[in-house]
Amino acid sequence: MKVGYASSIVTPPVGVHLSGYASRVQPSENVHDNLMCRALYFEDDGEVFAIAVLDLIGVSFELLNDFQNLTSKMLNIDKSRLTIAATHTHAGPELNQELSRYIARVAAGTVYMASRRLEEVQLYSGVGSAGAIIVNRRNPSSGLLDPRVHVVSFKYGSAYKALLVNFTCHAVVMGHNNLQISADYPGALNRYVEILTGGSSLFVNGTCGDVNPLTPKTDLTRVYDRSIGTFEDVEWMGRILACESVKTAELSAFETPNLRAKNSIVKVKIWKPLTVGEARQELEALEKSKESSDAYRRYIVEAKIRVLEKFKDVEYLDLPITVLTLSDSTALVMLPSEILVEVGLKIKESSPFKNTLVAGYCNGYLGYIPVEKAYDEGGYEATFPTCIVERGTGEKLIEESLRLLSRIR
């Protein structure tokens, strides 16, 4: 197997608005650390595949299409062999059309550079654990967690060339009160891994829709409130995950590479629990109420209107799934959007592969995808308009992911 790595800075100008918190209405004031595009390019026995990961909250379908169109032309490879993902930092920019197109060009160029830096490597794969630094925010006392720190290392002899790290946690160490551009803990994790190994690091987030950081000052009675987060906490979490990643890499077993990829589309129905007219009436009522100045309430109601208008004549959405095998023991499942942890856990538990990494925020974003029971429980992640897909979508993703894993096995 040959692997190439490249990275590029995608930090926007100070003054852009940051994404992720509806109550944060002020623009950014500073750059704490650069946002990056990191890319790995794989080549093995005639097969090729590339993955680019951006320090953004998500990858829109427009950005996905621009990236795949540009990269496939530059490298003359099929779009199905190209994945673009986000780390889900909540200290990155809200994307307008201009910035989105620029980042797509940078990402395409980064993959191109990686394809020109191919080196022969040996593959190692292992799994560590870091459950002490995460919490299920929907159920802090007993909710599901995925503590696994998956690490795939690419080495030449004893030298690390690159490490692929997969962990499942929202990149929300910093809260709504932060006005500094930052990659949050994924940026610190990558930086410390590179310091410790001398190689390059690429982090892919998991199905972390309901999983938050458990930093030292986290209040479990207000677990959604990340205003207590500091950049010292970002470094703390990055160090812990980097040390666990490097320990896991050092203890990992050699595996014979076997690069293969399969893709599929899951068709899901859009959830429209009210009409555009009803949503507009809700906004009018809010404007007349004492809560008219509540930025979060206004954001939610306005988002309902935007979603309902955007999908007025659309009933179904296509969700892409990609499965990539790196060896006969290690596979990476790449899922779109923002998915609850139970989906990733069920895929891993039933996968025919010994080590199954599951990445979220890949190849498109359309909000939260819960499991069916979450709709009955309610809450932020399973309520319209933060969730716009009908119940059963999470289960469809599990079923189709396992079908692809079995086929490619």
Image: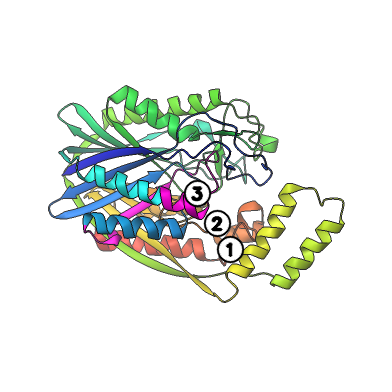
- Residue at image coords 66%, 37%: 225
Instruction: Kindly identify which residue carries mark 3.
Output: 341
Amino acid type, label 1: Ile
Q: Earlier in the sequence, mark 3 or mark 1?
A: 3
Q: Position of residue 61 (x, y in %)?
A: 45, 60
Q: Is residue 54 left or right of residue 352?
A: right
Question: Are discs 2 and 1 less than 8 Å apart at CB?
Answer: yes
- Residue at image coords 22%, 46%: 115
Above or below 136: residue 268: below
The answer to whether residue 254 shows anywhere in this view is yes
Above or below 50: residue 235: above
Q: Earlier in the sequence, mark 2 or mark 3?
A: 3
Give the spatial CA distance, label 2 vs label 1.
7 Å
- For label 2, count other residues whose C-alpha is less than 10 Å away and answer few (under 14), some (14-19) or many (20+): many
Instruction: Kindly identify which residue carries mark 2.
Output: 367
Secondary element type, mark 3? helix
Q: Earlier in the sequence, mark 2 or mark 1?
A: 2
Instruction: Kindly identify which residue carries mark 1.
Output: 388
